[in-house]
Image (spheres, rainbow, N blue to C red):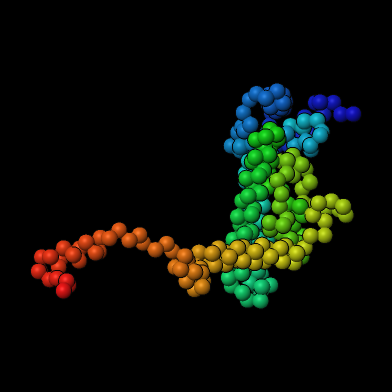
Amino acid sequence: MKTFKEFISEANKYGIPEDEYEQWQKDRASGKGPARKTFGGVEYEMRNKARQGQSSTWAVSPVSSRNESGKKRRKAEQETQLSQDELRGAAGGDEERASLAKDTEKTGIEKVIKRGKRIQKATGVRQSLGHKQPLQPDDPNAEDPGHSLSNVKPEPLGQNASKKNRRPEPGESGYGLTRTQAIQSALKRGGELGSKIDRERDLETPSRAARLLSYLRRPKPKNTGAAERMAAEYDKRVGRSFEN
């Protein structure tokens, strides 16, 4: 069993003075003090790196490394998004269907993010956009589902961070999900959206028979006698009479 001092010296890899490092850890553990500090011209961030359900483990990492990690993750997401070419090819060159599929992917992922925010507000547990099959920038596979609507879900931040990019095991969420399935699901959603748009367009543009029927059913204007009165007044003024 390591003593706290031994743990401090092991975790403090960046040459931060041990007394300051230890005090910083204690402050962060008690909810005090800044999350970021600068030592030797390098900015560091103190974070709880424990997995969900484990006791707190406060340690630092350079902010620049975290920024690079974030850039790498965003780049991986962009590279593994379902592309227009993939969707168009799977749809047999159908440009409109591929475009609709792309739209449903984008709006669907945005809805998942919003759902995560609602869960976070209701539970107080910080959520993030998790991947059922984590992105694999270092070990790419053509059949990985990547950053697609079929492969994302709201997930507690601690749980999402702790699983790293480990592929799911049999029985776990996302196991067996392939890129082909993700593409077919996207095209299906695009097709459903197209059908919905067509139905709404048909409802807004009635058929010729419906237009004729609506004309026949239109109520006839009420005869107020105004036309007869105007004709009689005209005849009177011009001195015309139809009496024998």
Residue 132, relative to residue 5: is it above or below?
below
Q: Quadrant of the C terminus?
A: bottom left
Q: Position of residue 146 (x, y in %)?
A: 71, 59
Query: Horizontally, is 243 left or right of 184 in the view?
Result: left
Locate the N terminus by quadrant: top right
Q: Nearer the viewer, residue 25 or 144?
A: 144
Which residue is painted at 67% across and 52% down in the image?
73
- Viewer-side residue, 197 vs 203: 203
Q: Is residue 37 above or below residue 212?
A: above
Q: Is residue 22 left or right of residue 35?
A: right
Position of 191 relative to 13 (above/below): below
Relative image position of residue 210 (x, y in whole percent):
51, 69
Q: Can residue 172 be seen at all in this image of the molecule?
A: yes
Direction from residue 8 to residue 171 in the image, left or right: right
Q: Position of residue 11 (x, y in %)?
A: 77, 34
Residue closest to the far front: 244
- Please report the residue visible at 63 percent of the width from the left and 72 percent of the height from the top: 88
